[in-house]
Amino acid sequence: MTPMSTRISTTRRLLSAGVAVGILLPLVVLIDGATRTGYSLWRNGVSQLGTGDRAWLFATTFVIGGLLLALFAIGLRGALGGRKGGTWGPIMLVVAAVGFVVGGLVPTDPALGYPTNETGPASAAAAIHQVAGLLIFAGIAAAAFIVARRIAEDGPGWAIYSRVSGVLIIALAFAAGIAYRLDSQDIWRPGPAGLLEQVSLIVGYIWLVVIARHYLRRSQAR
């Protein structure tokens, strides 16, 4: 193989990690949440899966997901080269990858009745986990906006899709936060905080898969 073909082959393998993370994370999280006693996909946030009897599964999934996302970021950097969006887009994905790893390793506190109804002052671990969650949502959304600048060269529809995905990720995550507070204050119980957060993440996961497949096709054409 020539150096160029070797580089393309390596980039393709790294880009495939984006497809893997975009399928693995929602699949495991949704199945795990749907089969846990007392957990509500409507009400409870994804982070609550990091508590309870199967907390290890959530932790393992998020750490692996973060590592796969970091590999995808490297592959995307190679696919975009030094062109616009080719530096900060992948950097924002690495930020999100750090969020996944930290969020998996540092669990949050029980909340909204899961795994128990006992609540108290927020722990230091919960505060760290909250920051990790912010890195995930902000990182993927920012990457979507930045990559839109580059992918616009492949057609305006691609740029529109990427920007809309970024807006939806932020808007749904913000709405989930509001629903959580309303529920915790007994104003709206049970609120759809879990559903809104799940949809926000799924929008991000789909974006990862779509972008990964797009640049996989382009690398194959090369």
Image: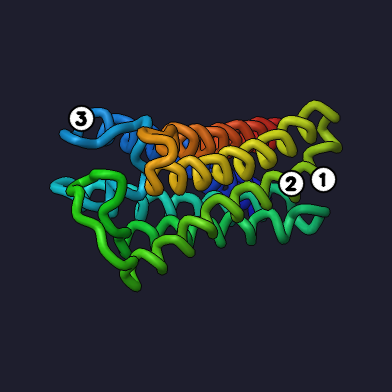
Taking the image as drawn, is residue 160 in sight?
yes
> At x 29% / y 33%, what residue is drawn?
40
Q: Where is residue 120 in the image (x, y as percent from the top left)?
A: 26, 63
- Between disc 2 and disc 1, the foreground one is 2
Q: What element carries label 3?
A: loop
Q: Label 3 to label 2, Cα distance in Å?
A: 35 Å
Instruction: Choose the circle earlier in sequence order: 3 or 1.
Output: 3
The reply to whether the C-beta atoms of the residues labelled 3 and 2 are less than 8 Å apart is: no
Which quarter of the figure is the C terminus placed in? top right
Q: Where is residue 221 in the image (x, y as percent from the top left)?
A: 71, 31
> At x 72% / y 31%, what residue is drawn?
161
- Reply above or below: 185 against 33: below
Q: Name the residue under label 1.
A: 149
Q: Nearer the viewer, residue 6 or 47?
A: 47
Q: Position of residue 72 (x, y in %)?
A: 54, 49
Q: Label 2 to label 1, Cα distance in Å?
A: 7 Å
> At x 75% / y 50%, what residue is drawn?
146
